[in-house]
Image: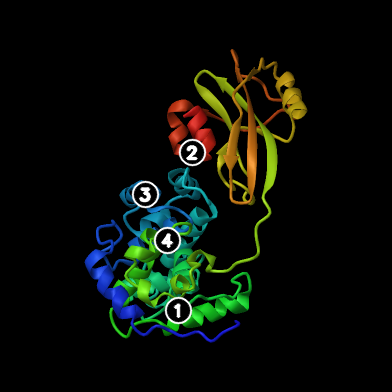
Amino acid sequence: MSKEIVLPALFAPTLVAWQRRHGRHQLPWQNTRDPYRVWLSEIMLQQTQVTTVLGYYQRFLERFPTVLELAAASLDEVLALWAGLGYYSRARNLHACARAVAEQHGGVFPGDSVGLQLLPGIGRSTAAAVAAFCFGERVAILDGNVKRVLGRLLAFDGDLASSAQERLLWQQATALLPTEGIESYTQGVMDLGATICTSRSPQCLICPVTELCAGRLSGEPTRFPVKTRKLKRGRRENWWLWLEHGGSVLLQQRPATGVWAGLWSLPLFDDEAALQQAASLIGAQLEVMPRIQHTLTHFDWVLHTHRAEMAALPALPDQAPAGQWVARERLAEYALPAPLKKMIG
């Protein structure tokens, strides 16, 4: 850091008062101290907008009202319900965490942030959010929105690509905590980042802490937080073979690691020649479908699809795609990637 950080003493009380009057209070995971419901929402909200999460959250609770029922489900069932929400490692960690809570803790979540961090898929910020909302623990969160709020508030010019600088921001986040009202404070800093202190167009004129914000006073609030390491986006191109027979679709389960791990997909090929060879082995007459452009975190994916309706159930030789024939009316039971679900649903 190139300068001393001055912590605004009025930040916490101002934020708490604002949240209680103007913050969000009616989200379905609010107004509860049930760790299961809060944890579920925190996992779903990682890198996902509230509007997208709402429907998934409700469906999950209807199917899995308790952590024990989630733990008892199969991973396939969890992935199927998660399909379309993206970042599928969250769903696998969700299931693993539920099982750990059931098997190691008798279905009861640990009662503090330290114990919560020992569970699969729960990092420091998520553990802190659950502990603050459910147990009133005075502990700081630091997700993406909060890094932005505090980075601007403090004009924090340390590069958050550096773990040392991120640790320093954690220290400042902890130092800013109020002595009371941790629930309102935690929700307030989340609300501020989600609704006012947004990434590209912060609404400084209506921000409750605008007079305390060193980033605004600098004249360049969007310069903070600083993170120089940028992901290099890649491009990938693959070919899908869409085979149907008698109202059933041939699906393959993806490997346990990598993109769409554990999901069900059409047979996927690295090039068109390989797809054509597999199709010729079973006598499939292919129809070319519109290509799909799918954007993921690290790369853009171009998916070409060739479709064939088989008059008879083909005998699949060793070189042809293996898989499972699934009736169309049962596709909802399978975890399909979002672009595939949209295409064949």
Question: Which x, y percent locates residue 20?
Answer: 24, 69
Tag 4: amino acid: Pro
Is mark 3 in CB contact (under 8 Å) with mark 1? no
Camera-side residue of 155 and 185: 155
Q: In the rendered image, which residue does mark 3 sit on?
A: 51
Label annotation for residue 202: 4
Residue 134 at least partly seen: no
Residue pointed to by mark 2: 334
Measure the C-alpha gap from mark 4 to mark 3.
20 Å
Q: Is residue 8 above or below residue 246?
A: below
**How busy is the neighbourhood of tag 2: few (under 14 within 10 Å), some, or many (20 plus)?**
many
Callout 1: helix, strand or loop?
helix
Rendering coords of residue 299 (x, y %): 64, 47
Is residue 283 left or right of 262 when viewed as pictured?
A: right
Q: How many marks?
A: 4
Q: Which amino acid type is marked by label 2? A: Tyr
Which of discs 2 and 4 lies nearer the camera? The answer is 4
Q: Which mark is residue 277?
A: none
Using the numbered discs, state the Cα–Cα distance from disc 2 to disc 1 in whole angstroms: 42 Å
Kind of element beneath mark 2: loop
* Mark 3 vs 2, N-terminal side: 3
Residue shown at 68% from the left, 54% from the top: 232
- State the separation of the CA atoms marked 3 and 2: 24 Å
Mark 4 Cα shell of 10 Å, populated few (<14), some (14-19), many (≥20): some
Q: Give the image location of residue 188, x and y in percent.
A: 33, 69
